[in-house]
Amino acid sequence: MLSALAPRIVRIARGRLARNALSLYAVQGLNFLLPLALLPYLLRVLSPEAYGSIVFAQAFMGYFIMLTDFGFNLTAARDISVAREDPQKVARIYWTTQAAKCALLLLAAVIVFVAVGAVPRLREDWTVFAACSLLLIGSSFFPTWYFQGLERLRDTAIIQVLAKCLVTTAIFVFVRTPRDTVLAAVFMSSPQLIGLLAALALGYPAKPATFYRPSLAEIRAALRGSFDMFLSTVSSSLYLYTNTFVLGLMAGARPVAFYSVGNRLVSAMLSLTSPVTQAVYPRASLLFASDRPRAWQLVRRVSWLLLPAIGAVALLTAIFAPLIVRILAGPSYGAASLVTRIMAPIPVLVTAASLLAQTIMVNLGLARYLWRIYLMVGLMNLAILPVLVHLFVADGAAAALTIAEALGPILMICALRRHENPWTSALPSGPA
């Protein structure tokens, strides 16, 4: 039997889906390990003010990355995937999307230039903002959506690995003191731009073989086609960059550095659960369509696996926050300990929200409620953020984010209760 199965297993392992999955795991591991190795070095070499100024500028650029993306990372990837057997159609989609992104980049550049010149708090660090603009340029031109649409994620993985290794090496070699802040900002903001240059240098086809000149009508149609996705992204990202930006605007770069340390630790904890929730999604989709009781059983099992585990990690992080911060960042960042403790529940809340939103609501046809929920969460964050930052500075920004993240699962459970698959009857108490 094993001999009969062996050729089939080999075919699956060599398949495009398996290669793409392994490539994504490699990139995810690299995204976790390289910053983990680099962050303690940067926190010690740069002062809290210098490091905070870079995080502040990158948070500001994040708004414009959302603008230039405009949902194309999903809609254009989908369209190219459907049209992949038609080279002329692929070329039309690619060049139309790039033209739309260039127009949005020009608009973003004008807004950034005016804002940095007009707002004193931004103008005083204009060199850091100029360096961090590479983040916006690289994000606009690196065609992740093109590689994804053609299922060439292995190429993307190789390019990203090479670029991030080059950036990490450059930071260790050239960034030595707080006087190198602008240089650090250049390196930290350039992986995608370096990746694009590396792709061109190594001969990776990062664009179709043929050129297509899109009309204005086609560009407008592409923008209209992605507008709903853009709104959904904006509504779910109101607090992604806002807490860092408002904190920097109101209190300066130093508190931003303390907030960023806590935020990085939260992101590291979330990396423990996100692969599981992503892996469960396709199986849940199949079961919700074919066998509803087994689908709920799967959700229950995953919930009883993930939530206690990430809860234990969050509790340990809160208890040992001073020690973790001292090891990670050094004595200059002692104020980040309380920030970390305040944000420690966030991985549990986000994991619960991911299970509710992706695994359940999307598969029950309730996705249309999600952008409203995210909008309400974002507006709640915006309402309480300035007050809490004024009263408690970085601790207040952390509290605002934690409160907002707690609201998301509550609203999702309420939405589920109002429909034909009530949460209480679907998930009985106790593990399966």
Image (spheres, grey):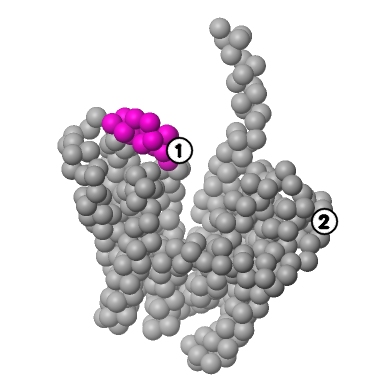
Upstream in the sequence, badge 2 or badge 1?
Answer: 2
In terms of secondary structure, where does tag 1 sit? helix
Disc 2: CA contacts within 10 A as few (<14), some (14-19) or many (>=20): few
Mark 1 belongs to which amino acid? Answer: Pro
Residue closest to the eye, 272 or 40: 272
Residue closest to the eye, 248 or 231: 231
Asked if the residue at tag 1 contacts the one at tag 2, i.e. Cβ–Cβ closer than 8 Å, the answer is no
Note whether residue 217 is visible.
Answer: yes
Which residue is rendered at x = 64% and y = 22% of the image? Answer: 10
Q: Which residues are magenta?
A: 281-295
Which residue is rendered at x = 43% and y = 83% of the image? Answer: 249
Query: Eyeballing the image, is 251 above or below 9?
Result: below
Query: Eyeballing the image, is 314 above or below 243?
Result: above
Note whether residue 37 is visible.
Answer: no
In terms of secondary structure, where does tag 2 sit? loop
Q: How far is disc 2 from disc 1 in space, using C-alphas? A: 35 Å
Within the image, what quadrant is residue 310 found in? Answer: top left
The residue labelled by disc 1 is 282
The residue labelled by disc 2 is 210
Residue 425 rendering spot, x and y as whole percentages: 18, 39
Hey, which residue is sitting farthest top in the picture?
A: 1
Residue closest to the eye, 332 or 386: 386
